[in-house]
Amino acid sequence: MIRPNIGTVLVVSVLVLLFLIALGIARTIGHLPELAMYLTEDLFGIILAVFVFERVLAWREERRWVAAKKWMYMILLETIDDLLKHLLPAAVPREETDGETTVYEVTGARVHFGEVVAYSLLRLLVGPDDKDFQSHVFWYAKELESPRYASLAKTALAEAREQIRDTFGSSARLMEADITAMLMNFEQAIVVAMGYVDSAISMRDEQLEDASNLDEESAKQKMREADDQLAFTTSFVVEPVVSSAMKPKAWLEDQLHRREDESPFEYLQVSNPTR
């Protein structure tokens, strides 16, 4: 059972007693309408003052954490972009021409923290909705050799998940509901992808063990098939991870690109590089 606060009960009792005394005096001297008018004005003034004071305190508290929020957004955005750099090729060759298709590029806009250039933004030119996206990742996995790519992808996924969890643990009170939900979905996609990559690596190892009993030519063929299967599986797994990263990435970029006149105490800004 919740016990009432004695101090609060005492204050309320005194106020009620004073009100009853004032009401009795007003009725005795015939000034009840004036009392009602004065009480209405005083109550309105008190409520208005409390509301304005509360809003000012809330605004000051919000402004107090602006720099910390922007710094947190930048760290999260850098985490997502670093993961994309590990999972995706910067460019892939075109089969029909001697040129190449750019998958992502680092844009000219850079995030500044005060006078220090803290981070260059990544712009994805071929997204997960593109019909050639998985084939680009498959080519990249084979180019790096599928066991190496799978190991690098697994490490990058684990680091991204750890950074997101660290952010939840240290800065959860600074995060809005929207980005929290997006990051939770993103982390869940990472966890699922890590499980699939582990299974694909284990399956490849089992196939190589089976190939050890074959002749040399058959063993090489079995190894190529196992590597191709690993490359295909990892490229298939990467697609939903990149897709789930797009919403938080866009939200974070929007937060970092807000114009200064919309936020008068901005500490972070985006500008073109000076060199």
Image: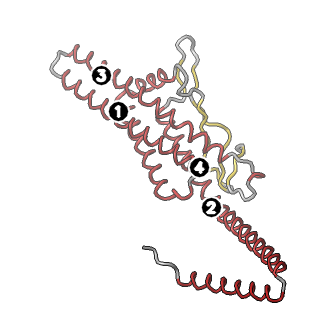
Cα–Cα gap, marks 1 and 4: 29 Å
Cα–Cα gap, marks 3 and 4: 39 Å
| Place of residue 159 in the rendered image (x, y in percent of width and height, measured from the top left) | 43, 45
Cα–Cα gap, marks 2 and 4: 14 Å
For badge 1, the amino acid type reads Tyr
Mark nearest the camera among 1 and 4 is: 1
Q: Which residue is mark 3?
A: 226
The correct choice, above or below, for 174 with respect to 194 in the image is: below
Label 1 with label 4: CB-CB less than 8 Å: no
Q: Which residue is mark 1?
A: 196
The correct choice, above or below, for 77 with respect to 65 in the image is: above
For badge 4, the amino acid type reads Met
Q: Which residue is mark 2?
A: 65
Q: Nearer the viewer, residue 237 or 175?
A: 175
Position of residue 8 in the picture relative to residue 166 (left or right) = right
For badge 3, the amino acid type reads Ala
